[in-house]
Image (cartoon, rainbow, N blue to C red):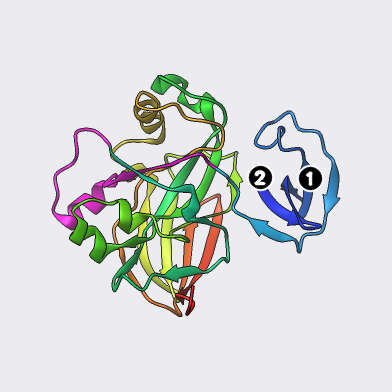
Amino acid sequence: MKFLRFQYNNKPRYGFIEDDKIIEVSEKDYLTNNHKRLRECPVNVKILPPANPSKIICVGLNYRDHADELGMEIPEEPIIFLKPPSSIIGDRYPIIYPPMSREVDYEVELAVVISKEAKNVDREDAKNFIAGYTILNDVTARDLQRKDGQWTRSKSFDTFCPIGPWIETDIKPHELEISLHLNGEPRQHSNTRNMIFDVYQLVEFVSNIMTLKKGDIIATGTPPGVGPMKPGDEIEASIEDIGTLKNKVISHPIGT
């Protein structure tokens, strides 16, 4: 099932896609199987980011082929960092190129969306705390990452976390093709089977550090092929059985 958030009659609403139609549900029923159908809405509504998390936990260097590409050793445990919720945008929203950077990269990732409060979860029980999966682009100002020696500034600009277009509930996360195209040209490609730490291991690891809330996101790392993008570029991030997240890069608006 594809859950999504959308704007209708100037209000944010919640629903799912059924036979190319959007069926609205209440906020409390969002991401659950026990939802009451409220109404059918037009399909040409404005699509919003599918999650509104309290936090976005990201994992660095989590694909074996990416580690090979960089000539780096396989980490013994996940390397995590945070992106702020203010960095989130949805499908077809513009990524704004910040004026203080000269090297902004794309990073396609499978994102896990948490279904309910999770603390000290065991790997074997992790799937019971996952609502579904979406696509995330961990946009990074690479020059600032090198300059700062840590990742906060480089990962945190407004619009640096495109997610969407929806949350898919009915997939198996450990055997999915993942790819990214820049202006129609392939740039990244792998399969989630190449993850060093799988989805359930990450839920266990993170929930033993911090309490996860409904709607929180764990971004599971990016495959090889990370590279720069510039204003005017179009990015298509795709994951098998989920879909494609599309965003265009624009220059920072003058005077803002």
Rendering coords of residue 80 (x, y %): 30, 40
Q: Which residue is mark 2?
A: 3
Find numbered disc 2 in the image and state the secondary structure of the residue it sits on.
Answer: strand
Q: Is residue 20 visible?
A: no
Rendering coords of residue 99 (x, y %): 36, 73
Rendering coords of residue 76 (x, y %): 19, 33
Mark linked to residue 183 = none
The magenta region covers 53-78
Amino acid bearing label 1: Glu
Left or right for 4, reference 80: right
Q: Which residue is mark 1?
A: 24
Rendering coords of residue 248 (x, y %): 50, 72
User: Which one is earlier in the sequence, the residue at label 2 or at label 1?
Assistant: 2
In space, the residues marked 2 and 1 are separated at their CA atoms by: 10 Å
Left or right for 237, reference 214: left
Find numbered disc 1 in the image and state the secondary structure of the residue it sits on.
Answer: strand
Q: Please report the residue visible at 82 percent of the width from the left and 38 percent of the height from the top.
A: 37
Q: Please count the marks in the image.
A: 2
Q: Residues within 10 Å of mark 1 (few under 14, many from 20)?
A: many
Q: Please report the residue visible at 70 percent of the width from the left and 53 percent of the height from the top.
A: 6
The image quarter containing residue 132 is top right
Left or right for 180, reference 8: left
